[in-house]
Structures are given as structure tokens and as C-alpha cells.
Image (tube, grey):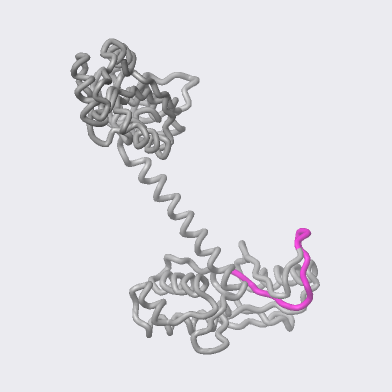
Amino acid sequence: MFLRCHGHTAEAAGIVLPKRVCFPLDGVQDFTSLFVHVFLFRVRTRSRHVYGVNSRMRKCANVCILVTPKMDIFQDRSTGTRFRVLVELAAHQPSVQQKDVAASLGITVQAVSEHVKELVLQGWVVSTSKGSYTVTPQGVDWMLRMSRQLQAYSERVGRIVRDISVTAAIADGDFEQGQVVSLEMREGELHAVPVRPDDAVRATVDRCAARGSAVGVMRIEGVIPLSPVDVTVAVVPSIQNVSGHADLRRLLSLARDVKLVLAAGVEALVALRASGVEPACCWGVPVVAAEASLSGVSTLVVCSAADLPHVAERLAELGARASIIDVSL
């Protein structure tokens, strides 16, 4: 429940309030306690008038009191639509056409008109002329309250989804349903291990799983740390360089030192196969390499000198660091 007061500038808790303020009446059960609440508010703020809008009027000791129930954005469809209308008015004020608001929200102009009338009646919008609307401070306050309700509900949905969603991991032991385990990332692979006291990330096993199998985990708590590594880019001669050759021994040595080998372009594919290495992927190489490196997977990208600018630029755009090695003879 809320009351609004006007009169002299109010000072409460060291904060200077405007001449019109709105404050919650949490814990007020009846009009007797409401009168006490209002009286204390008047004494504290030196405000002479207390009033509200759109509700029944009550009089206590010559103080006009109107009680307004706290509005919930989910209480009905109308409240939610009115909130969206107010947001559109605020986004395009002061010159706003109701037909544009209707088109944006997918409702009729008549519906927008009815909601605008209610917003004006509530004191949340001021209309000086046709097509001219300004959101009042009270309207901003209501928008913020509704947005906080939406945020709180969104966070609740997120928690529920996180609790019921199941993520696959590699089982490093035999686990029972409901058992709490620790999670860790190894070279891009998520592993479930027996719980340890100092582990930061824990989860609950969805169902029984044997060592080495895929195990479903849910209710993950904590953030799994990742250790990004640099992408090694080996540059071979491009087709335009008729006298150039790739150092196949060095290329093979580089390939043996990493977990993932990628070929960007025909020259790179031919050079790798000539060295006895079959690349894991030949398409979308910068994207794959960036994802792997950010997950801590050691990666070698082989490309021609002509393709190097594109590969290096894409890796940088995707947030991956690269170490460039020329393997030309």
C-alpha cells in the first residue's frame, strides 16, 4: 500500500524529498494504525497534507486519507499493457502518436487511448495537447517499480531453469542419483569428480552413472574457471609463391604439441596431409579456434600467407590471442 503527500518539503532519513512523495505503508493493517502511521509521518516531515488517488476516501482526525493498493504488473493483462504503453510514451516523449504506439505493441489505437486516459488519471502522464505526452516523476516511479518486479520475476525464472536444466559431463567416478559432485574443465571437456572441500563449483547428479560415461548434472553452484590459451598459427606459402615450400617436419612437430589441428585453405590442408597430419576441421576455422582456445584447448591453425590477415583479424575479433609462426622454407 502507498500514500502520497504534498505540502512542505519533507526531510526523512536525511533525504530531501520533493513536494509530492510516495511512501510504502508496509505492515498497516487497519485505518487506526494507518492514522498513527500518517500522524508520525506528518510529525517527522512537517507535511500538512496526505492523500492518494483512485481509491476510497477515509477521514481520520481531519486528515484526508485515500488508500491505494500496491499494484502488481502480473495481476491482470491490463496492467502489463498499460506498463508497455507508458514505456513507449517515455521513449518517444513529448511528441507521440497513439497509432505509432499501437503499431509497436500490436494492439488497437482504441486500446492505447484507453490506457493513456488511465495513465493521465493516475497522474503518471501529462497531456498538454493532442499527440503531446510527458511522463511525470510519479510515472517514472511506477515504471521503476514495475521493472523491478519484472527483474525479480526474471531472476526467479532463471533460478528455476538452472535448477531443472541438466548439463552433460564426463563422469570421473561411479555416481548415484542425487549425489553432490565437483565440476572442472579440462582442455574444453567438462568433468564431474568426487566432491572435494576446496572445490568452488558443485552440482547434483541427475541419475546414476558409471565412470567414463556421460553424467547429467543440475543445480550448478559457482563459476567454472577457464584458462584461455594462445592459438598457434603456422603460415605456409600461398599458391602465388611458386618457389615456396612448407617445412613439413616443423609442421608435424607443431601439430604433435597441440590437441586440435585446423586447416584454413587448400594450401594448409595439402601441407598438413603431406606431413602426415589430418586436420580436425577445414571450415569456420577462426571461430572453432577461438572457441577452443578460450576453453583452454591447445590449438594449431595452419593457413597460407595470403589467408593470414583474415585469420588473424577474425581471431582478434573473437577475443583469441594468436602466436604466428612462419613454417616456410
Q: Could you tell me which residue is drawn at 48 percent across and 55 percent down?
A: 151
Q: Is residue 239 left or right of residue 91?
A: left
Q: Is residue 279 left or right of residue 64?
A: left
Q: Is residue 320 left or right of residue 328?
A: right
Most foreground residue, 303 or 99: 303
Q: Position of residue 47 (x, y in %)?
A: 77, 74
What segment carries the magenta color? 1-15
Q: Position of residue 117 (x, y in %)?
A: 48, 84
Most foreground residue, 104 or 157: 104
Q: Is residue 50 magenta?
A: no
Q: Could you tell me which residue is drawn at 54 percent across and 63 percent down?
A: 145
Q: Is residue 170 visible?
A: no
Classify residue 302 by image quadrant: top left
Q: Position of residue 149 (x, y in %)?
A: 49, 59
Seen in the picture, residue 141 relative to 171 is either above or below; the reply is below
Q: Is residue 3 magenta?
A: yes
Classify residue 109 by image quadrant: bottom left
